[in-house]
Image: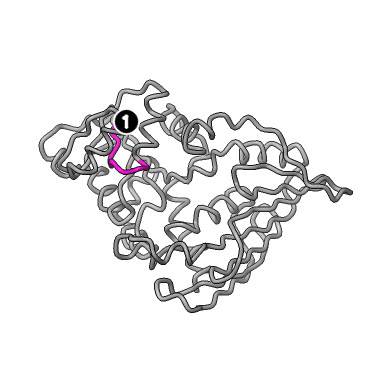
Amino acid sequence: MIYLIGTGQMAVDYTKVLLAQKRNFKVIGRGSSSANNFENQTGIKPITGGIENYIENNEIDRISEFIIATGTEVLMETLKRILVTGARKVLVEKPAAISIDELLQNEDFLKPFFDKVFIAYNRRFYASVIETLKLIEADGGLRTMHFEFTEWAHKIEPLQKAAGVKENWFFVNSTHVIDLAFFIAGMPIDWKCYSNSGQLKWHEKSNFAGAGITNKCVLFSYISNWESAGRWSLELFTDKRRIYLKPFEDLNIQNRGGIEIGKYDIDDSLDIQFKPGLFLQVEDFLSPNPTMNLCTLNTHIQKAKLIYSSMLK
């Protein structure tokens, strides 16, 4: 049995994928208001009362698979409750905790489950990213990378979020970009990183820069200023071309020796029909042998320690 935990918009997006894949699944939510809204959007009536209540009153099959799509503030709490049931596999929405501290404080508890928990960084499964990886391989490998994870502070500040979410926005949101960048280029092994505080009242740091080399011998740099202009972007350099993911859903190419930047045709029909990356991510997770494209819990913890914590210092 597949269990989908949560009844918010992310759970709605997962439901569309699960229905399209003709999966047999149950949806477990907490309150009646969000459950009613979920049912109105999907036609599926969730089980209410929360996952704690469900576990207490029902036997969970040890071959069950869980997708956790709750609010960020309860991701870790929900993950821990599910893991003790003996679930076979768990896909938990990124970043699996509300903060780096919460993630690392639970590392010892999570270690026995490293082989069965995956973090849902769905941008790894964008059609544009999959084609980018093919182009890099065809060109003989990646040489250089530059990325930007500027957040629009003026849009984020008025958002009503649970306590701790905006204060940890770098971990909660910016790691979408950073995870993808180092998924493609490898882990940094020799690098320098810098960050400054700005005028934001809800996040300590707002200005970031850094550069170095990865274990795949890829030179990289990054920059981000949340109080200036900018956007998320990723630029990848091979011996034959410069690849632009800006925005990530689009793939644009500048060939060596030329100045024109042209759109590269890709089959992105799944990313148009469903939330981008979600269909292939779920398909991979539910396969008998998930691929290395999925972000493992162990990799996520290592990135939190070695990359995300360093970029914030």
Location of residue 161 in the rendering, given as x and y in whole percent from the top left corner? 33, 60
Q: Relative to 213, does residue 267 appear above or below in the rendering?
A: above
Q: Residue at x 60, y 36 (%)?
A: 127
Residue pictured at 45% horizontal, 75% vertical: 200
- Disc 1 is placed on an element classified as helix
Camera-nearest residue between 118 and 268: 268
Residue at 58 percent across and 70 percent down: it is 228
Which residue is most to the top? 22
Q: Position of residue 112 (x, y in %)?
A: 33, 47
Identify residue for label 1. Answer: 42
Residue occupying the far left of the picture: 57
Quadrant in the picture for residue 169:
bottom left
Q: Is residue 231 magenta?
A: no
Amino acid type at circle 1 is: Thr
246 sits left or right of 291 in the view:
right
Q: Which residues are magenta?
A: 1-10
